[in-house]
Amino acid sequence: MAREKERIREKRREEKGHKIRRRMVAETDGQNKSLDEINGSIDVPQNAGPLKTFLAYLGPGVLVSVGYMDPGNWITSISGGAQFKYKLIFVILLSSLIAMLLQAMAARLGIVTGRDLAQLTREKTSKTGGIILFIITELAIMATDVAEIIGSGIALELLFGFPLIVGIIITAFDVLLLLLLMRLGFRKIEAIVATLVAVILFVFLYEVVLSKPDMPQVFAGFVPHQDLVTNKSMLYLGLGIVGATVMPHNLYLGSSISQTRKFDRNDEKSVRSALRYTVVDSNLQLTVAFVVNCLLLILGAALFFGTNSELGRFVDLYNALSNSKIVGAIASPILSMLFAIALLASGQSSTITGTLSGQIIMEGFIRLRMPLWAQRLLTRLISITPVLAFAIYYHGNEEKIEGMLTFSQVFLSVALPFAMVPLIIFTSSKKIMGPFANKTWVKVCAWISAIVLIILNIWLIAQTL
């Protein structure tokens, strides 16, 4: 009898969730669409085979994945390998699994509700709470841009000899490139970013093959090591890897660009199909990001562990790859050039997605209403200004400028729970998600991830102080 009553109550909750979800979708169809100019802009074939349907959904995962292999990952992952050999590969694996879980939840939120994470956070929190979360999120975007802009600027310096400040200013105007790409269609953006990701993957795969890593030790690195908690330096760098891998702005981005496909949001079957293909796309692309991050750490360990080389800067890595005293017989200017090309590809692809994330956050939290070109320029200027000011202040001291990178990645790890917690709450709510709310195992895994990360952050801050 009790089970029957509970079943009836559960059914009523689901029906109520259906009504609320349909109301939210109807309201969104009328106005306030996330990234309105590309929302629902890509048609999905009806009654097509699984492969053709999957290809239609293939793309948003690529844009999400570039945030997991941006220049901020490079310093933390390669330095992690150089200092602790393969012990931190487990952190990359754990971070990637958490990323897959969170990005699947973000995509579900966007597809089911027709809202992105920023919009829902603003709706469900008080005005004061919304402002606080907006400030934290905007600071996270700035921290993300530190790595992307500095990485691109240094790549331009290494490839063409531009002064770093000039390279940073050139990167700042990448927003104009995004405006042009938007006119060509979102599919073109996905294709361009996918090409840049392929360049990064093959460059580092080639360099790792040449470095001949100790594969048994590599696989042993996937087992957690106790030093991760007891060794302060390893913990700091480990959290830097988490911050560089699971980035807060990607959760906002994923919840928005998952809505670029056009399907019937009021038809449960269509929604489930969209969820299934979008999550497969996301997991596939994040697996590529996981491989790239592992390659970065393996390269750092195979070439630089035990060499006493200073690898805190991109320039150091560039120079080391052509120095036979450090990396041995494989040293070559070609390796250094490939590194710089991959760095530029990473910085440019991350800049595109970072600018989109900035727009999503500005629109969602403060409901900014202005022409799209002005909006994108404003969000770009807000995020780039602190980086440019820091670069001008420390002009000529590139070591100081690049020193911002690891700190920025640790800050992203600290800011991550402020995006994770609302995402978990919203996607677990039957009132918001209806029958698409998180299953029990998803909720448990998500909350454990958030709690562990918060505890590690508190521990890190306590150790630092």
Image (spheres, grey):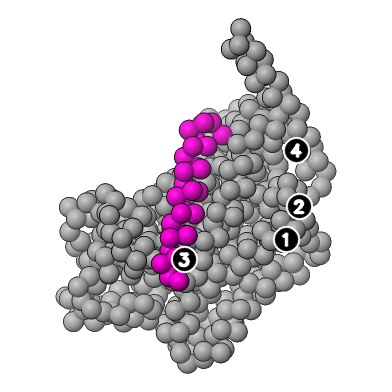
- Measuring 27% from the left and 69% from the top, which residue is drawn there? 83
How would you classify the magenta stretch by its main secondary structure?
Answer: helix
Q: Which mark is residue 25?
A: 4
Secondary structure under the numbered disc 2 in the rendered image = loop
Q: CA distance from mark 4 to mark 1?
A: 25 Å
- Measuring 69% from the left and 61% from the top, which residue is drawn there? 132
Q: Name the residue that disc number 3 marks.
A: 461
Kind of residue indicated by mark 2: Ser
Mark closest to the chain's N terminus, 4 or 1: 4
Mark closest to the chain's N terminus, 2 or 3: 2
Q: CA distance from mark 1 to mark 2?
A: 9 Å
Q: Name the residue that disc number 2 marks.
A: 126
Left-right relation of 101 to 292: right
How far across and how far down the image is residue 464, in percent?
43, 70
Q: Nearer the viewer, mark 4 or mark 1?
A: 1
Q: So how many labels did they put on this image?
A: 4
Mark closest to the chain's N terminus, 4 or 3: 4
Residue 334 visible from this viewpoint:
no
Secondary structure under the numbered disc 1 in the rendered image = helix
- Measuring 62% from the left and 15% from the top, which residue is drawn there? 7
Q: CA distance from mark 2 to mark 3?
A: 28 Å
